[in-house]
Amino acid sequence: MWDPVSGDHHTTVNFLDEVKSLKMTCVFYAVSLRLHLTVSDDFNLFVFNENFIHVAKLPLHTRLITHAVFLEQENRIIFGGLDGLASFHLLVKCKHEPKANLLLNPRGDDMVISIVADAEIRDTPKWVKGLKWFSKNNDRMLVAWNQY
């Protein structure tokens, strides 16, 4: 992890050692939930808290995922990959709000995390090779492409 403004190096985390997986295909961060999420090539979603402690492993029941976007307001993850686009709702339950939970329970023991496939995204390209979310005021747009 590094600071993009100052260029200072903060910490190094090896997700592969923690979850015993061969390869991570994408990593993203949920600001509102204070969670790091990563997808492995064996089709699992791994969740880490801000202390980089592994708190959940969730099977995705989909093929290779190479891109992900987290929609903060809806706690929704949009995945792009070999099967096109898929949308999942991320459900997080804990005793306290995310910032307080990190202080009061740094290991994340009381967190219950699950995902639910929630919205069909039709007419999308197969084998998504890029994904970008744009949001300004009330205008929202998801752009996906299948060529470099």
Image (cartoon, rainbow, N blue to C red):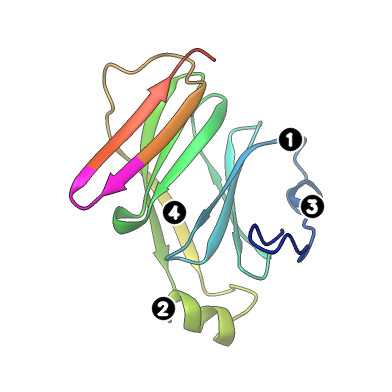
Type of the residue with mark 1 = Lys
Q: Pick whichever of labels 4 and 3 is earlier in the sequence.
A: 3
Q: Pick whichever of labels 2 and 4 is earlier in the sequence.
A: 2
Mark on residue 140?
Answer: none
* Percent of width and height locating residue 58: 54, 47
Relative horizontal placement of residue 21, taking residue 123 as reference (left or right): right
Q: Residue at x 45, y 65 (%)?
A: 33
Segment tinted magenta in the rendering = 134-139
Real-space CA distance between mark 4 and mark 3, rounded to the nearest whole angstrom: 23 Å
Residue 144 vertical placement versus 7 (above, below):
above
Type of the residue with mark 3 = Asn
Residue 70 vertical placement versus 117 (above, below):
below
Mark on residue 23?
Answer: 1
Instruction: Residue at the far front: name it.
Output: 6
- For label 3, the residue is 14
Mark on residue 97?
Answer: 2
Chief SS of the magenta region: strand
